Image (spheres, rainbow, N blue to C red):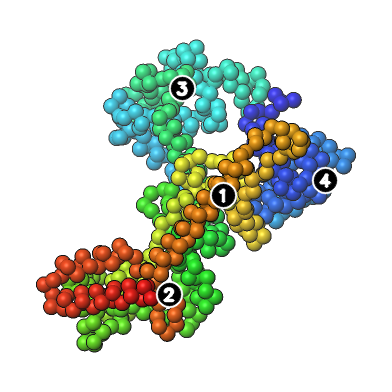
Amino acid sequence: MQSARKESTIRIYNLFWKTFAWWCGCKRLDPLAPSTGNILEFLQDGVTKKLKASTLRRQVAAIAMVIPLLDGFPIGKHPHLLTFLKGVSAISLPVVHRFPTWRLNVVLHALTIHPLEPLKEVSLNFLRMKVLFLTVVTLARRVSELGALSSRKSLCVFHADKVVLQPDPSFVPKINSKFHRQQEINLPSFCPRPSLPREKSWHTLDLKRALKIYLRRTKDLRRSESLFVVQKEKAAKTIQKAWWIHVKTRLFKLLKHTIRAAEHCISHDILKRVSPLEAELLKDPSILFKVRFRFAGSSFPPFVVFKIFCISGGQGSKYISGKTIITPRSEAAVDACRLMGYRKYYKLILQDELQFKRYRVTDEIDVATVKDYMHYSSLLDETPAYFGGRHNYWRRLSLENFPRTMIMYDIMEYAQSGKMSARLRCELPFLLLRPENEETYHAQLMAVCQLRFVTPQPTRVRPLGLDQQSAPRSSERRSYQARQKIAKMRKTYKLDKEKTEQKMDISTPLTGHREAKIPLQACTVNRTLFVEEEWEKEAAKLFAWSKSLGEDTGEGDLH
């Protein structure tokens, strides 16, 4: 029964049947025992996806290939299905193809002049184009029949006034009859003995002459008996290019689901992995923020970047920094210069001048238009905090920043390494489905954010007597001594830790709680910097002040 249909028809029917089986699996239905309403609902989904009536009829034929009867009727002749398909044909507008008009005499005249003549000197590409066009116009056959023409000497016979062509004996035509299988194609010569200039021009359109030259020039390139030589390298590149476009489109859809799910569902979890301090700060309910994820990169696949946006709610927000608060002629600027040192202070001033010459809009007083404000805001985000900026730029996410318990980790791993996990392969048809409504879109986001739970291994319960016999006896004296030793080590560690914290903490006299911790390494670096700046006028006073501050701290610890 399968041999009654062509291979192409069987392949199309199998594809439609797999689509119907997958649809039934999503609806939790048995594809081998559907009801009339189930098949009508499946066809209605096809109408929603804007499938044509001819495609729906092929879907019905594919289902009928597996399920011949439905409610006592053949599926192809079921009254409800026939009425449905008739209604689809009535409401669907016919597609009108408008092709550009062309004149045959103009094209034939172009085939008689350069660059398509003379045939012994033209390129092989032009020769193939001319032979194909003359064959198609002369024979007016199907593409499959033209592809079945053979260059075998018994199937391509040249006579004095004609050429006889026959298709390959293994070819099965559209109408599989003895007449169509054994039919010969006779192509007479066109102006075989030209004498006048016009006849010589017409003789260049002789298919016998063009075909003879084409077979002679492609003799060394042939790898099969097909009449027309196909450049396999070019065809392979075309197929490969189409395949890579399909793979990249599929990957882009998965990445798009990933960043949408990350932005709507787990932005705080990702931020907690990247920057725990910022995540802890943004837990304050008074701070309204939005984490946005975008694609970046100059090649495919792109990488994911994120940025934190503060939402002011229409009230506006003010960014406070030393660059904007400390004015040049105030005492705060003099004190800052004394604390920082002249070298570092002058370095910041030079950095501001260089930044102004490069970007031109580096301060609020430089803003004159909306474009200047956008440029200034972007520059403020990218500038480090120690130069007076926000230090809130687009930061790149790596694979380790995504939770392993979610399928988005599998998607990012597939984008970077090209390896698809079993879970992603199972969820791939649903994630690539085009969402037709809000429910499908929400279900796709939830599928990307869904946690993966590891199934626990079953525990074996062993008899109590067997465990007591098999377990080795431990020394009670040794375990007691070990516990005593661990307790002493823990107590000593706690005492040392408390002493270290007391030495490193600075408490204010008003509140009494710790405000800052000064590590010993930072103190050493600061003292080294002060020694290097002995040439400065205020270095001696600053060093004396820091020395007295260290002595006061030491006395406080002693008391």
Relative placement, left or right, of 226 versus 464 is left
Compare residues 450 and 47 and report the one nearer the observer.
450
| Mark 3 Cα shell of 10 Å, populated few (<14), some (14-19), many (≥20) | many
Question: Alpha-carbon distance for marks 2 and 3?
Answer: 90 Å
Q: Report x, y in % for residue 237.
A: 42, 35
Q: Report x, y in % for residue 161.
A: 43, 17
State the residue position of label 1.
483
- Along the polypeptide, which appears first: circle 1 or circle 4? 4
Which secondary structure lies at badge 4? loop
State the residue position of label 3.
227
State the residue position of label 4.
35
Q: In this view, which residue lies farthest toward the bottom?
A: 330
Residue 207 can be seen, yes or no: yes
Above or below, 167 relative to 272: above
Question: Alpha-carbon distance for marks 1 and 4?
Answer: 72 Å
Type of residue at label 2? Arg
Mark 2 vs mark 3, foreground winner is 2
Compare residues 115 and 336 and report the one nearer the observer.
336
Q: In this view, which residue lies farthest toward the front?
A: 477
- Along the polypeptide, which appears first: circle 3 or circle 4? 4
Type of residue at label 4? Ser
Type of residue at label 3? Leu
| Mark 2 Cα shell of 10 Å, populated few (<14), some (14-19), many (≥20) | few
Mark 1 vs mark 2, foreground winner is 1
Relative placement, left or right, of 234 versus 267 is left
Mark 3 vs mark 4, foreground winner is 4
Question: Alpha-carbon distance for marks 3 and 4?
Answer: 51 Å
Above or below, 372 relative to 308: below
